[in-house]
Amino acid sequence: MKEIRRIAVLGSGLMGHGIAQVAAQVAKYEVSMRDIKQEFLDNGMRMIKNSLQRFQKKDIISETEMNQTLSRIHPTLDMKKAVADADLIIEAVPENVQIKKSVLAEADKLAKKDTLIASNTSSISITDLASATNRPEKFCGMHFFNPPQLMRLVEIIRGAKTLDETIATIADVSKKMGKETVIVKKDSAGFVVNRILIPALNEALNLVWEGIADRDDIDKAITLGLNWPMGPLKLLDYLGLDTTLSIAEVLQKEIDPKYSPCPLLRQMTRAGLLGRKTGKGFYDWEKK
Ligand code: CAA
């Protein structure tokens, strides 16, 4: 198994900042967090500080641990600086195949030959993403759940050429980050969780679109009837409607037309009603 000391997280958004935090806070890795705009990095660091403060207020970590965690996270706009010394690169840029492939190709050229690369994609083919690099055997999926600071699962996905050693190392890193893992043996769109979750969220959208029940009743039905921590429409806002649309489109294209996204999902995405990240979706998040 490869020894991992330094990690580069590409992307400082909803997932990237949380992954960087868990890597530095729980596994105590040195972490570079790279993004393309200073404001994205500033926002990522603000979310990390906010999350660490919540843990500190609850005495889960001390003030010293909070400051040590922050000192292990190195935000940067420079790809070379981010990946040059990394033993593992975790890609967490937007859920778009072109953007992911171009970022992965750039990171692959600048990283050491033996560095592992893992993608946090929620649905895109690992084999396809691996083809953007010259190290498909050192490449796999490492799928965290939102919020990565609290959700205990990591799905590890094998691409067509992934070596057993790569999977074993990523499983070990996940464990050091305090996560439970499941292995997805075949590279299939949506893996395990999103193959089940996205159709369920899409049906909640269909219920609204068809006028069958109102938002609050749909969310109440599922929180009380299935014991979900939040209803499906709130969860859609939490995940981002644009991200959910991208995953649904991949399921539709790669697996079966039956996964076709509800027109309301497309319409709300076009209108910028993306949920928490834009302040409005099914709920008004600006009020919170
Ligand atoms: N860091 C630290 N603490 C956090 C936090 C963060 N980022 N976010 C929330 N918390 C803490 C809060 O401080 C709060 O603590 P207390 O109860 O001690 O006060 C607690 O978590 C609950 O938070 P809130 O009161 O703000 O809100 P909530 O009760 O709705 O809980 C939640 C938030 C933990 C996210 C919970 O609603 C939940 O588990 N929701 C479901 C999330 C889920 O299903 N995620 C998976 C989505 S699928 C996915 O991610 C895959 C994909 O590819 C799309």
Image (spheres, helix red, strand yellow):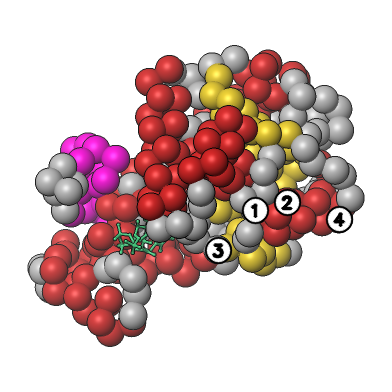
Tell me, yes or no, whether the two marked residues, 2 and 1, touch with CB atoms within 8 Å.
yes
Nearer to the camera, 165 or 229 = 229
What amino acid is found at the position of numbered circle 3 in the picture? Answer: Arg
Q: Secondary structure at mark 3?
A: loop
Residue range highlighted in magenta? 262-282
Label 3: which residue? 152
- The location of residue 19, given as percent across then percent down, is 55, 44
Task: State how far apart marks 4 and 1 are (Cα).
Answer: 20 Å
Label 1: which residue? 177
Q: Secondary structure at mark 1?
A: loop
Residue 173: numbered disc: 2
What amino acid is found at the position of numbered circle 1 in the picture? Answer: Met
Quick one: label 2 or label 3, which is nearer the N terminus? 3
Residue 102, placed above or below residue 237: above
Residue 214, placed above or below residue 248: below
Tell me which residue sits at (72%, 47%) in the image: 140
User: From where the camera sits, is residue 114 visible?
Assistant: yes
Residue 24, placed above or below residue 213: above
Tell me which residue sits at (80%, 51%) in the image: 169
What amino acid is found at the position of numbered circle 2 in the picture? Answer: Val
Is 106 covered by the magenta stretch? no
- The location of residue 183, given as percent across then percent down, is 70, 64
Q: Secondary structure at mark 4?
A: helix
Label 4: which residue? 164
Quick one: label 4 or label 1, which is nearer the N terminus? 4
